Amino acid sequence: MHALQQKIREEGIVLSEQVLKVDAFLNHQIDPQLMHAIGAEFARRFEGTGVTKIVTLEASGIAPAVMTGLIMGVPVIFARKHASLTLTEHLLVAEVYSFTKQHNSMVAISPRHLGADDHVLIIDDFLANGRAAQALISIIQQAGATLAGLGIVIEKSFQAGRAELDAQGYRVESLARVSSLASGRVTFLD
């Protein structure tokens, strides 16, 4: 997706050979026009797959997931990272490690919102080592739902996440595939 790649080149900041900061438009400040274009692209790529729900992880996946859900006309569920007084029933839970935060979190979804009759599209901001994706897949499996695929805004193709998901037979659609962050420069596969 050319507009996303351009935005990454112009406003992304390479912090190291492993970390790309995109808080100017994706995960702190949000560019609504870009998010709308991202949602439209995911909707186009997953058109006709029978998606009934979109699942993401709070908080950075919410904006692209909501735009995709709006265009596809389906509800969006986000896995919560923090305990809540309102989230008390038997929960669908998984543990996820955050590379950027350097810690594990438990994430949860209420089974009232996700069930065996759902065909789910996962939308997330980044795919690196695949830990967040695997946690969401586990929750979807716990619910007895099926997975239509994963829509990733930015994939760090030089890390193992994509290869693991491909090996498991999952459909992965990434809008910007970063092949390297070496020398402070973003290089794309496509």
Image: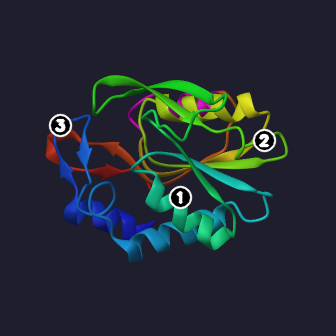
User: For the magenta stretch, what is the residue range?
Assistant: 157-167
| Tag 2 secondary structure | loop
Q: Is residue 50 left or right of residue 127?
A: right
Which is more N-terminal, label 1 or label 3?
A: 3
**Quick one: SS at disc 3?**
loop
- Amino acid found under the numbered disc labelled 1: Ala
Crowdedness of circle 2 by 10 Å Cα count: few (<14), some, many (20+)?
some
In the image, is residue 160 part of the stretch drawn in magenta?
Answer: yes
Which residue is identified by label 1?
65
Decide: marks 3, 2 in contact (CB < 8 A)? no
User: Which element is circle 1 on?
Assistant: helix
> Would residue 75 be found to the left or right of residue 179 on screen?
right
Mark 1 nearby-residue class (10 Å; few <14, some 14–19, many ≥20): many
Q: Is residue 130 visible?
A: no
Residue 117 lies left or right of residue 129; in this view the side is right
Please say whether residue 42 is visible from this viewpoint: yes
**Hey, which quadrant is residue 23 in on the image?**
bottom left
* Residue type, label 3: Ser
Magenta stretch, overall SS: helix
Q: Quadrant of the C terminus?
A: bottom left
Amino acid on which disc 2 is placed: Gly
Q: Which residue is mark 3?
A: 16
- The image shows residue 156 at horizontal and vertical percentages of 39, 41
Residue 104 higher or lower than 183, as above or below: above
Return the residue nearer the eye: 112 or 183.
112
Q: Residue at x 26, y 34 (%)?
A: 18
**Image check: 168 left or right of 189?**
right
Identify the residue position indicated by label 2 in the image. 115
